[in-house]
């Protein structure tokens, strides 16, 4: 795993795109150039051409590396979904030509749901933004783990 202090040209820090990969939706989040603020960005629906959509976002947002949430079991082991996520991340990295980092995403969905606690929204309305918020939690955990 590369350190979060990767630098681009002129000493500018890399912007990371956080990804919460799921079978139905892919949540996206981004950090600022100083790697101090993470923000939910988008939720991609369906399996259409997710790689092309992410590639467009990577270019538009000047992203330098990807952080994909890895769904580990509570005991830290990897199951079938973690294997599928690694395959997705590896393929995406090759497609967009960027390094991919994997970050333990255990409890990121729970944290995202806690962010919405007390907000009176129907469950169907709440589900979509939760994926982007979970991606922001994954990205924040990655950045915190790699700060000097």
Image: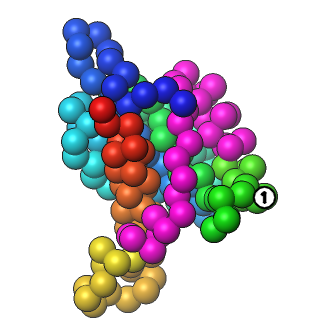
Residue 27 in sight here: yes
Q: Nearer the viewer, residue 34 or 91?
A: 34
Q: Nearer the viewer, residue 131 or 72?
A: 72
Quadrant in which the N terminus appears: top right
Q: Is residue 137 above or below residue 114?
A: above
Is residue 90 a member of the stretch shown in magenta? yes
Q: Is residue 59 above or below residue 88?
A: above
Where residue 9 appears, as percent x and y from the top left, is 29, 10
Asked which secondary structure carries label 1, the reply is helix
Span colored in magenta: 86-112
Seen at 55% across and 21% down, the residue is: 97
Seen at 73% across and 55% down, the residue is: 78
Seen at 23% across and 19% down, the residue is: 12
Residue that numbered label 1 is attached to:
80
Residue 59 in sight here: no
Which quadrant holds residue 73?
bottom right
Quadrant in which the C terminus appears: top left
Q: Nearer the viewer, residue 106 or 121?
A: 106
Is residue 97 a member of the stretch shown in magenta? yes
Seen at 30% across and 84% down, the residue is: 117
Q: Which residue is most to the right?
A: 80
Where residue 15 appears, as percent x and y from the top left, is 32, 32
Which quadrant holds residue 89?
top right
Q: Is residue 82 above or below residue 66?
A: below
């Amino acid at each position: 795993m590369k350190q979060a202090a990767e630098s681009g040209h002129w000493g500018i820090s890399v912007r990371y795109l956080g990804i919460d990969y799921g079978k139905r939706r892919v949540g996206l989040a981004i950090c600022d150039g100083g790697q101090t603020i993470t923000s939910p960005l988008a939720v991609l629906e369906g399996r259409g051409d997710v790689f092309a959509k992410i590639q467009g976002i990577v270019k538009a947002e000047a992203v330098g590396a990807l952080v994909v949430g890895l769904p580990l079991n509570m005991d830290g082991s990897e199951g079938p979904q973690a294997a599928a996520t690694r395959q997705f991340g590896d393929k995406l990295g090759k497609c967009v030509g960027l390094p991919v980092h994997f970050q333990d995403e255990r409890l990121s969905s729970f944290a995202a749901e806690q962010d919405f606690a007390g907000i009176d929204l129907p469950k169907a309305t709440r589900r979509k933004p939760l994926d982007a918020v979970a991606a922001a939690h994954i990205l924040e955990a990655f950045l915190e783990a790699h700060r000097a």
